[in-house]
Image: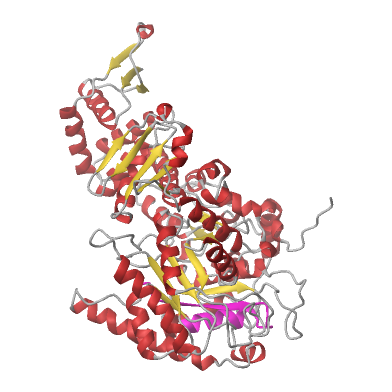
Amino acid sequence: MTTLIYDGTFEGLLTAVFEIYEQRLTHVRMQKGEWHNTALFENVVKVVTENTRATRVLKGLKQKLSAQGLQRLYAAHMAEMEGEDDNLVGYIRYVFDSPKNVEEDYGNKYVMRVSEIVRMVRREKHRMEAFIRFQELKDKTYYSAIEPDYNVLPLLIKHFRNRYADQKWIIYDIKRSYGLYYDLHETQYISLDFATINPGNVISAYEDNEAVYQELWRNYFTSVNIPARKNTKLHLRHVPKRYWKHLTEKI
Amino acid sequence: MNVERITEKLNILADAAKYDVSCASSGSKRQNKDKGLGNASNGICHTYTEDGRCVSLLKILFTNVCIYDCAYCVSRKNNDIKRAAFTVQEVVDLTISFYRRNYIEGLFLSSGIFKDADYTMERLVQVAKKLRLEHNFNGYIHLKSIPGASDELMREAGLYADRLSINLEMPTEAGLKLLAPEKNRQDMITPMNFLKDEIILRTEEKKLFKKAPMFAPAGQSTQVIIGATPETDQQILQMSDQFYKGFKLKRVYYSGYVPVLSDSRLPALNTAVPMVRENRLYQADWLMRFYHFKVNEIVNHDNPLLDLDIDPKLSWAIRNLHEFPVDINKADLRMILRVPGIGVQSAQKIVAARAFRKLNWDQLKRLGIAINRARYFITCNSPQYERRDLTGTAIKQYILAESQSKYIKNSTVQLNLF
């Protein structure tokens, strides 16, 4: 058994696959993070992410997978789910070792697992598209904070760019301390230092009518409910409690 | 902005619109253009009410003032309630402000009828026009067409709205005559027909000239109230089938009657909302639209009512045991879609996956099919076959016993002991 330690990026993962084939490794285990000396007696390979190698693997994948299939693999990696890297590498190896495109071979355990991971990630991406609530700041930027289970922020760029092309917006992942900023032209990754912001300033940073629209939305949410049809279980299944703290209508 | 006044109007006019069940915001192809605001090609539910219904559009009435006196409607003329009316600008501002904050996918605008059909319809069209032309708004707009409005206004509505709908209100003409004697089914059908023809015409035009404007790209839909009049499920579903075929409707919505008014022609005020029946009608509707079922396979002379304790597909399967078991590894997609517990997506995955290898129970389970129902109706690459020689009644008993949480909770009488 060989342990491959890599940096957790998609490029890193692809570089690791390159190493596996180059060194003809059969039994491998993936691990994210730094290489430590404690691994002295194990068979450990430290993967140094290299763009040329990653690109070659990517090119190979493009030949074996549909564009969609590749997207799905990328989304599965973006999930950053604990302990799933072995399955992703297993999937990639199965793809390379098969003569034809196997992305729909759901009877295979790796294909099945990737499909399950993608389903979970897509679901959360979709939920973020639904549950993001922007608040207008004084400078006309629309700000939103999120805390998704998986790292879906990069998967949201296209959707929000297409939707809000004429307003500046920030979507900030509090859990992972980074965000997206769209300035009417470009979308870029940013990080904000909340420690330096005085809570009083945050409130004064909102546009004057912001509180009014939030209140109107809460009112609307209450008005459309039909008490005779109350169904809390169904409500919770659609809007799990962990999302409530960022939902204007549930605060 | 007069905050208090707007708040009050929104409360009144959202409350009055909430019995309209349509909330779809998908099926349009409108893309963001010229760096404007929004697009209407996603169909996202942004939140859910406490009764579990999806909220994707700002669904309001333009006004709840109405010249009609329909027995089932809260806004009826003789009901003593607060009345209000928005201005065109107010609806536009609310829509834009809510959309920018990602609360909604767009606007669903309906209205009570003040003065006459054209006067009312004209205002609805003005809202849509202003949103599109002045605000470059590309989000979803659903307008409720007013029966009796002129063709010219309907045509204009189609140019700015994504979807248009005209409510049939009652599944049959007799039901409508009973509860809304001033209304006339023909007034609803005439504009539906006009829209159908117009949509076909514009689609042809669009094929020839790319630049031709879109016309109601998400089509038209309708809504019927169920449980207020004594129609059977067979009558209701046959009506839907006829409208899907004859008018190319995208959706028929079924709205379980919520008793809001006391009237000798209507169920009493304490009657429970027929939520399970409504759910079964939607499931049956789905079977017709996505599972290739014919309406008389679901309901017919011998079975005019849908089972309330099991879903209509399971019900059909139990009545047609001779069609089973289905061999998952050989049957065509159409037959796999008929197996209880298998949805459209899993059916497609099964067909894709078996090109590589034969599937067994374990793999089927991980593909997402509901084994507890499906196992009585299929064989696969595992030796066990669950049905043995069980009768339909026995299968139903086994399934019900195993899936308590799913079916039994639906009993409409909720006992509250404490």
In the image, A56 versus B331, the foreground residue is A56
Percent position (x, y) of residue A37?
A: 35, 6
Residue farthest toward the right in the current orientation of the protein: B417
Percent position (x, y) of residue B150?
A: 40, 91
Q: How is the image coloured?
A: secondary structure
Can residue B220 be seen in the rendering of this structure? Answer: yes
Q: Is residue B227 magenta?
A: yes
Q: Quadrant of residue B81?
A: bottom right
In the image, B255 versus A98, the foreground residue is B255
In the image, B371 versus A81, the foreground residue is A81
Q: Quadrant of residue A88?
A: top left
Asked if residue B117 lies left or right of residue A18, the reply is: right
Percent position (x, y) of residue B361?
A: 52, 46
Q: Residue at x 38, y 89 (%)?
A: B194
Q: Please count the marks in the image.
A: 0
Q: Residue at x 37, y 80 (%)?
A: B157
Percent position (x, y) of residue A70?
A: 28, 43
Q: Residue at x 58, y 88 (%)?
A: B67
Asked if residue A2 lies left or right of residue B330, the reply is: left
Extent of the magenta region: B218-243
Q: Does residue B93 lie above or below B148 as drawn?
A: above
Can residue A102 be seen in the rendering of this structure? Answer: no
Q: Does residue B338 lie above or below B375 as drawn?
A: below
In the image, A122 versus B238, the foreground residue is A122
Q: Does residue A144 lie above or below B313 as drawn?
A: above
Q: Is residue A120 magenta?
A: no
Q: Does residue B266 lie above or below B293 as drawn?
A: below
